[in-house]
């Protein structure tokens, strides 16, 4: 490999020092807060899940507040602190970073730690995303169903500390990539809003216009599950798709294969969920769904909807897939009040869905398929362009943050 001349020039002969995270700054664990504690105004707070669903790498405001009295009892992050997610079901989300850039202090939940330091906080956040940093995870993450990292283990992670001027230049370059992606994403968001508007119009029916049935009447509703991680037999040489939220995030809402697979011995009672079922997330990350086109299993965060045989000739599964966007919104508005968000399942099974004539369903599906291709296709249009820019960003991020020989390598 040839030397990265740009990085050599930037470093100008200065050696890059490697330090354990515990040497870079001081680590503080957050405190507990529950959904009942949240208010519409007050002291800004970031709770479990927001760091995954609401923010990217950087934030300067929150969407959640707590009382000022409660905030006095909790761990508070200051501007330029690095917030770090420490708990998730998936290794990919453990150690997700968030650079707090807001001028106001913010309270953090017990599923996060903050690093107080004197480095460039955006440089640290970018480095947490890098391939070099991610490779260290397997040594330190523990837990079976819930994956977590302790304060002591987090303190052991090694990171390169170039001069602040070099950190600033790396941030400037990577910011340029992320800003371009953000502009494209904003355009795509506008198109998706337009799509959602027309989708909801097509799926709106008056009470006497079509027949309405409750979910529990039309579908078999069953929770997924996670086979024991401690039993290697369940996870080695697996052939059966096992779906989780990462599959939707990475592969979209029509799924025919999974990132992780399990063996036949992991299947309870030898029964799989049938092909052409809908999965809807009803705990943790609420209100996401997908159509699964193969026999499968899912984790416990999903409720699985399979059309009952008595309705199999009356419902087009793709029509159900599109109507599930409306069900998603109901789920988000009807969660139980606890520290771990979950949908009110008694209400869920009583949600009413329309059953228009089958030809009308197919007509609606044909129209929405065309809209969906324009706004969600990963092989054409804006989604494809964004994917290319994200790959380009990841390439240069890992190039700029590879200090294995004192400078980056090409």
Image (cartoon, rainbow, N blue to C red):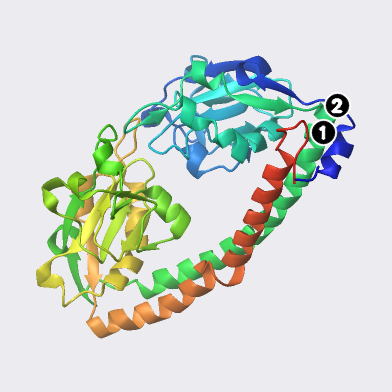
Q: In screen coordinates, is 302 left or right of 250?
A: left
Above-or-below relation of 359 to 36:
below
Residue furthest to the front: 1
Q: Which mark is residue 267?
A: none
Above-or-below relation of 21 to 263:
above
Corner quadrant of residue 37 = top left
Above-or-below relation of 84 to 355:
above
What element does badge 2 sit on? loop
Q: Residue at x 47, y 34 (%)?
A: 94
Q: Answer few, some or many: residues within 10 Å of disc 1's Cα (few below 14, many 20 plus, some between 14 and 19).
A: some
Q: Distance of mark 1 from mark 2, alpha carbons?
A: 10 Å
Question: Residue tagged by mark 2?
Answer: 14
What element does badge 1 sit on? helix
Q: Answer few, some or many: residues within 10 Å of disc 2's Cα (few below 14, many 20 plus, some between 14 and 19).
A: few
Q: Nearer the viewer, residue 339 or 90?
A: 90
Expressed as whole percent of the image width and height from the top left, the position of residue 254 reads 38, 65
Q: Residue at x 49, y 44 (%)?
A: 53
Kindly report which numbered mark, 1 or 2, lies closer to the viewer in this rendering.
Answer: 2
| Residue 322 is at least partly visible in this image | yes
Question: Residue tagged by mark 1?
Answer: 166
Expressed as whole percent of the image width and height from the top left, the position of residue 384 reads 59, 66
Corner quadrant of residue 323 = bottom left
Looking at marks 1 and 2 on the same chain, the residue that comes earlier in the sequence is marked by 2
Callout count = 2
Q: In screen coordinates, is 42 left or right of 333?
A: right
Q: Are marks 1 and 2 in contact (CB under 8 Å)?
A: yes
On the rendered image, what quadrant is the N terminus found in? top right
Q: Residue at x 48, y 14 (%)?
A: 73
| Residue 80 is at least partly visible in this image | no
Q: In screen coordinates, is 331 left or right of 44?
A: left
């Amino acid at each position: 490999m040839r030397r990265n001349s740009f990085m050599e020039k930037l470093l100008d002969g200065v050696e890059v020092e490697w330090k354990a995270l515990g040497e870079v700054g001081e680590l503080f664990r957050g405190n507990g807060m529950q959904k009942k504690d949240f208010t519409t105004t007050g002291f800004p707070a970031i709770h479990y899940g927001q760091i995954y669903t609401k923010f990217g790498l950087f934030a300067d405001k929150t969407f959640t507040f707590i009382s000022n009295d409660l905030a006095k009892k909790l761990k508070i992050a200051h501007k330029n602190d690095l917030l770090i997610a420490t708990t998730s079901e998936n290794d990919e989300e453990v150690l997700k970073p968030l650079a707090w850039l807001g001028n106001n202090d913010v309270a953090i939940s017990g599923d996060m730690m903050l690093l107080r330091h004197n480095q460039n906080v955006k440089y640290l956040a970018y480095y947490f995303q890098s391939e070099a940093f991610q490779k260290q995870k397997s040594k330190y993450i523990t837990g079976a169903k819930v994956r977590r990292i302790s304060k002591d283990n987090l303190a052991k992670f090694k990171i390169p500390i170039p001069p602040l001027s070099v950190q600033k230049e790396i941030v400037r370059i990577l910011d340029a990539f992320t800003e371009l992606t953000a502009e494209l994403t904003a355009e795509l968001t506008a198109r998706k809003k337009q799509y959602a508007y027309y989708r909801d119009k097509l799926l709106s029916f008056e009470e006497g216009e079509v027949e309405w049935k409750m979910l529990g009447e039309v579908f078999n509703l069953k929770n997924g599950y996670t086979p024991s991680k401690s039993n290697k037999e369940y996870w080695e040489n697996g052939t059966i798709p096992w779906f989780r939220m990462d599959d939707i995030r990475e592969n979209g809402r029509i799924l025919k294969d999974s990132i992780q697979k399990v063996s036949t011995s992991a299947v309870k009672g030898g029964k799989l969920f049938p092909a052409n079922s809908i999965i809807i997330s009803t705990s943790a990350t609420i209100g996401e769904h997908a159509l699964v086109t193969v026999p499968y299993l899912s984790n416990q965060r999903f409720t699985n909807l399979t059309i009952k045989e008595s309705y199999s000739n009356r419902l087009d599964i793709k029509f159900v897939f599109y109507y599930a966007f409306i069900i998603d919104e109901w789920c988000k508005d009807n969660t139980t009040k606890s520290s771990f968000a979950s949908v009110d399942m008694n209400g869920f099974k009583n949600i009413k869905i329309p059953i228009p004539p089958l030809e009308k369903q197919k007509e609606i599906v044909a129209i929405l398929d065309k809209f969906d291709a324009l706004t969600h296709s990963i092989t054409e249009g804006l989604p494809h362009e964004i994917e290319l820019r994200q790959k380009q960003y990841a390439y240069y991020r890992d190039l700029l943050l590879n200090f294995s020989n004192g400078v980056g390598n090409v």
